[in-house]
Image (cartoon, grey):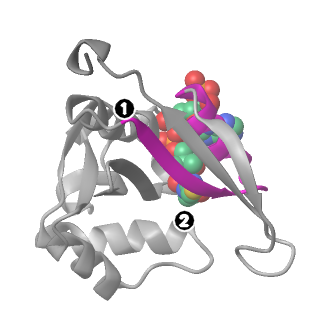
């Protein structure tokens, strides 16, 4: 079992540790601190149950997702899960939370960028019905293209008579 909650300053060191294990060019600790202070940003964490946790791991934080809500769109900027906790449905629960929040706030579009070569992440997003919309060549450096993926959410037409 996994609990989903908003990050607090106490989580930042562990989030940064997961980030460094997940990406060749990680965000800095300071950039995560800035996200906590931005009113349109939300840093969501997934905490694993004690039985799945490493005893030395204070808080059992297994993964995180960062999203911005801007101009009536949800942008997913970052999602990562600790390498030892992957393929357990943790990223899926974080995505489900970001999408449920968007639906509750009547957001119509959820967008993100993903490395073309990142099949794990592209599969994850496809599972939530995100579609490939555009290619940004060399977005992550020479030879590393980004794919812009988008999810269009149903809106309640009764509000638009
Ligand atoms: C991508 C990532 C966040 C997935 O986290 P996770 O908790 O292991 O993912 P989940 O267990 O929730 O998997 C959900 C779905 O994603 C897809 N998926 C996840 N890992 C996958 C892999 N290694 N290969 C293929 N598909 C994968 C599958 O469709 C999976 O559903 P299934 O288990 O029913 O097949 C994780 O691999 C990670 O942290 N990677 C490094 C950071 C990164 O690339 N982040 C994305 C940046 S855009």
Query: Is residue 122 within the magenta segment?
Result: yes
- State the residue in front, 121 or 98: 98
**Residue 95 or residue 47, whichever sits in front:** 95
Q: Quadrant of residue 98?
A: top left
Where is residue 85 drawn, in percent x and y?
Answer: 45, 46
Q: How far apart are marks 1 and 2 (CA)?
A: 20 Å
Which residue shows up at 30% across the image and 87% down it? 30
Q: Is mark 1 on a helix, strand or loop?
A: helix
Q: Which label number is shown at residue 22?
A: 2
The range drawn in magenta is 108-128
> Which quadrant: the C terminus?
top left
Along the line of sight, the residue nearer the viewer: 40 or 15: 40
State the residue position of label 1: 96
Residue found at the far front of this picture: 161
Nearer-the-camera pick, 31 or 112: 112
Q: Is residue 54 visible?
A: no
Depicted 52 relative to depicted 147: above or below: above
Measured as percent of width and height from the top left, residue 38 is found at 19, 72
Q: Position of residue 76 (x, y in %)?
A: 43, 54
Q: Which residue is drawn at 29% across and 37% down?
A: 102
The crowding category of the residue bearing disc 2, from other C-alpha atoms within 10 Å (few below 14, some 14 to 19, many at least 20), is some
Could you say which quadrant of the image residue 135 lies in? bottom right
* Residue at the (27%, 21%) spot, across then down: 160
Residue 32, quarter of picture:
bottom left
Using residue 16 as the reference point, say whether residue 117 is left or right of it.
Answer: right
Q: Is mark 2 on a helix, strand or loop?
A: helix
Residue 117, how many percent across, how many down?
78, 56
Q: Is mark 2 within 8 Å of ligand 1?
A: yes
Q: Which residue lies furthest to the top in this view?
A: 158
User: Is residue 62 one of those drawn in magenta?
Assistant: no
Q: In which quarter of the image is ligand 1?
A: top right
């Amino acid at each position: 079992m996994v609990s989903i909650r908003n990050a607090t300053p106490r989580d930042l060191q562990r989030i940064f540790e997961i980030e460094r294990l997940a990406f060749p060019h990680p965000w800095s600790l300071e950039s995560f601190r800035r996200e906590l202070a931005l009113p349109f940003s939300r840093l969501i964490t997934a905490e694993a149950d004690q039985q799945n946790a490493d005893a030395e791991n204070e808080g059992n934080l297994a993964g995180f997702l960062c999203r911005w809500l801007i101009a009536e769109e949800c942008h997913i900027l970052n999602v990562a899960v600790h390498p030892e906790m992957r393929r357990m449905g943790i990223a899926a629960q974080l995505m489900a939370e970001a999408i449920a929040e968007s639906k509750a706030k009547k957001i119509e579009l959820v967008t993100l960028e993903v490395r073309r070569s990142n099949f794990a992440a592209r599969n994850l997003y496809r599972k939530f019905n995100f579609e490939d919309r555009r290619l940004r060549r060399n977005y992550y450096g020479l030879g590393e293209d980004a794919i812009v993926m988008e999810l269009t959410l149903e809106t309640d037409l009764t509000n638009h008579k």
